[in-house]
Amino acid sequence: IYARGATDAKSALAAMVVAGASLRDAGLGDRLTVACIVDEEGSSTGFKHLLKKGIKAGYLVFGEPSGVEAVTIAYRGRVQLLVECRTRPGHAGSPWAFKNAVEKLYEFYRLLKRRIEEAAPKQEISGRFYTVSTSMTWIRGGDAPNVIPGLCRAKIDVRLPPGFKAVDVMKISKETAERFAGKNPGVDVDVQAEEWSDAYEADRRSRLLTVLREAVKQVRGRYPKLLRKTGTGDMNLLAGSKVEALTYGPGESMLSHTERERIKIQDYLDSIKVYRLVALKILGSH
């Protein structure tokens, strides 16, 4: 099936709905809930709403494309920063007389990037998942081609490995902004954290992972790979909680957000079977 969202994540959503509907007469009562939530790609509005209402579940499976023969057990954390740099604008014919807000913001970004990377805790395990990454993902500045800009705004995306807390990045950002402004008279830098979450890594000994691995083995004939992804998802909001959570769904994540999104029909059908088995084995044992 080729379609927008076929990979990320309409197939997982449809599979969960079908699996849940097929279990209505399985005697599970109200112990199984299929929650269709919005804004996973943005601010996790849907899942935050559920958390605010209070989740009574002990086990959560998020429907994201891990691949039908893989399970996502971990995501890096994330901090999204909004940086605003203000200076006195002036004529481009006299650039030496004014401080360029765009250039100064970029200087600040390079300094902040270095300080965040220097502050990252040393990891005993190598791999991209265990590294910190800092990227400028959005920038706006300037009013006219012949004016030295006096205002520039940018968004900085910081991804965090386990052990590097979002609150630490926010503290480093504030301190760096204060020091930068102190060394650059006439330059005002403000940093605000818009979104943040810590890294999440599931316990490999958890009951949910054991059951999910066995379900995939039963349906596909082999145990699934365990993935640690460098991105971030709704599951991150459970960092530090006692709820067991994993992310599982059909589809190749490398196809997400592309014009080549597709899903193999057999993978979709098999994921329904896996979801069913997980629910029956978890709830049937309680």
Image: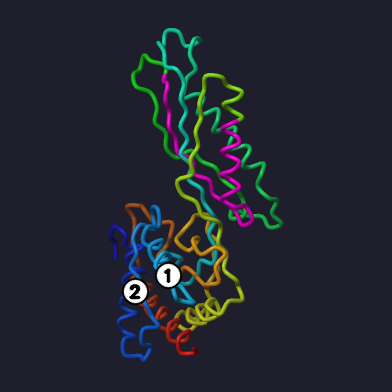
Does the magenta segment cover residue 174? yes
What SS does tag 2 mark?
A: helix
Tag 2: residue type? Ala
Q: Which tag, 2 or 1, sits closer to the chain's start? A: 2
Q: Where 63 sits versus 216, above or below? A: above
Q: CA distance from mark 2 to mark 1?
A: 25 Å
Picture quarter containing residue 149?
top left
List x then y, in percent, for residue 196: 50, 51
Does the magenta segment cover residue 165? yes
Q: Which mark, residue 186?
A: none
Mark 1 lies on residue: 54
Mark 2 lies on residue: 15
List x then y, in percent, for residue 178: 58, 31
Residue at x-position 34% and y-position 74%: 15
Residue at x-position 44% and y-position 35%: 154
Tag 1: residue type? Gly
Residue 116 horizontal side relative to residue 249, left or right: right
Q: Where 218 sits versus 130, above or below? A: below
For disc 1, the neighbor class at 10 Å (few under 14, some 14 to 19, many from 20) is few
The quadrant the N terminus occupies is bottom left
List x then y, in percent, for residue 105: 50, 28
Colouring used for the render: rainbow
For this rendering, which residue is in front, 88 or 283?
Answer: 88
> Magenta stretch?
149-178
Count of numbered marks: 2
What SS does tag 1 mark?
A: loop
Disc 2 to disc 1: CB gap under 8 Å? no
Residue at x-position 42% and y-position 21%: 150
